[in-house]
Amino acid sequence: MSILSDRINNLAESATIKMAKLGRELAAKGVDVISLSLGETDFYTPDFVKDAAKKAIDENYSYYSPVPGYPDLRKAIAEKLKRENNLDFNFNQIVVSTGAKQALTNVILCLVNPGDEVIIPTPYWVSYSELVKLAEGESVFIDSTIESDFKISSEQLEAAITPRSKVFMFSSPNNPTGSVYTREELAALVKVFEKHPEIYIISDEIYEHINFLGTHVSIAEFDSIKERVIIINGLSKAYAMTGWRLGFSASSKEIADACDKLQSQVTSGTCSITQRAGVAAYNGSLDSVIEMQKVFLKRRNLVFDLLKDIPGLKVNLPGGAFYFFPDVSSFFGKKTENGEVIENAGDLALYLLNQGHVAVVSGDAFGDPKSIRISYAASEDKLREAALRIKNTLALLK
């Protein structure tokens, strides 16, 4: 009998972190591994943000901060939402957390009761379903395909709704596919939500600035449902601040107060120095963000050309984020040189790591067992070499 709780025993390990760990273990043995597994930019935090953090240290920001964040940071976030997204939030509707993952956790634990259903389009970020599991809710998945650009239709959404539906949770731009919902596509989903006022919408917009289709569109822009939308965002992707750990939720005052209450018992306020850096980031120029977006667009086009040249891979052109999510099912059933059979995407990801020395992530963890996720948050030289290794390694399968 396990001494550990059912809660932790039933929880899956993060697949992205697991593959990164395996890649590091192989690299520690002297193997030249190219890691395309983590969702982390290879840029550095902008200097003006780092300078604000250094200044905060010198000014002795070393004490407990308010649980939902410093008021001037929350005001800066509210102003950002108005300036960049045309959304009206009071600062007391913003709760700052230790990363967007904690912001998501707060909201899910505050909204979901045991047995409540959370509708999640697939593919989805690995932690969505596990966070629902922690809340003792039930995930209801709506499958999408590469042919639909990994986006769901309003008809699929309507068919998934039951009397137990409580939350709809999605990301745009999407992790792991890079797909971006257009205003017209979101409007079609909104028409469904208008008929179901009991459903809340969690909109994960952490990749909003890595968007190649133009201005980011938030589902919170639709007046008819905006009171039920909870926005999740943060500094990690746009400002290359994954290790700084600052995310936020923007929601109704009732939900914000609930998240504040929960966070007060779990972590209290997030790092004071990071928050001062966050004030600078959200009040500052987007120049570094725009330059990063240009680099990612160039990389996306490069990797698309490289991947579509690999026989057996089915690839679409993502509209944002920094991932490709190719369908690799044509390789299932094939054998390695050692006679091992590739049964699924997990087998293929391990094969690419051990044989080709490229770390990618199996699509199983994202709700799509036919695909793998490839991050292109790496230099062009590494991306070219990685694509060549993948092509040559896959060609060995018979």
Image: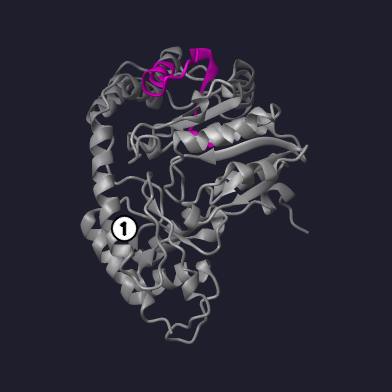
From what the image shows, is residue 116 above or below residue 86? below
Residue 159 lies in magenta, yes or no?
A: no
The reply to whether the magenta stretch includes residue 92 is yes
Give neighbour class at mark 1: few <14, some 14-19, many 20+ (Cα, 10 Å). some
* Residue 195 image position (x, y, % from top left): 68, 29
The residue closer to the viewer here, 390 or 311, is 311
**Quarter occupied by residue 154:** top right
Give the percent coordinates (x, y) of residue 251.
56, 22
How far across and down, in percent of the image, does residue 395 sit?
Answer: 36, 79
Q: Amino acid at mark 1?
A: Phe
At 24% across and 26% down in the image, what residue appears?
48
Q: Is residue 223 above or below residue 212?
A: above
Residue at point 59%, 38% (across, down): 169
Give the camera-side residue of 114 and 295.
295
State the SS at label 1.
helix
Residue 333 image position (x, y, % from top left) = 53, 79
- Image quarter where the N terminus lies is bottom right
Frontmost residue, 212 versus 251: 212
Q: Is residue 54 left or right of residue 371?
A: left
The residue wearing badge 1 is: 304
- Which coloring applies here? one colour
Range of magenta residues: 77-102
Instruction: Indicate the quadrant containing the C terminus: top left, top right, bottom left or bottom right.
Output: bottom left
**142, above or below 304, in the image:** above
Q: Is residue 378 visible?
A: no
- Image side of residue 237 versus residue 251, left or right: left
**Vertical arrangement, residue 396 with respect to residue 203, above or below:** below
Q: Do we see residue 132 in this rendering?
A: yes
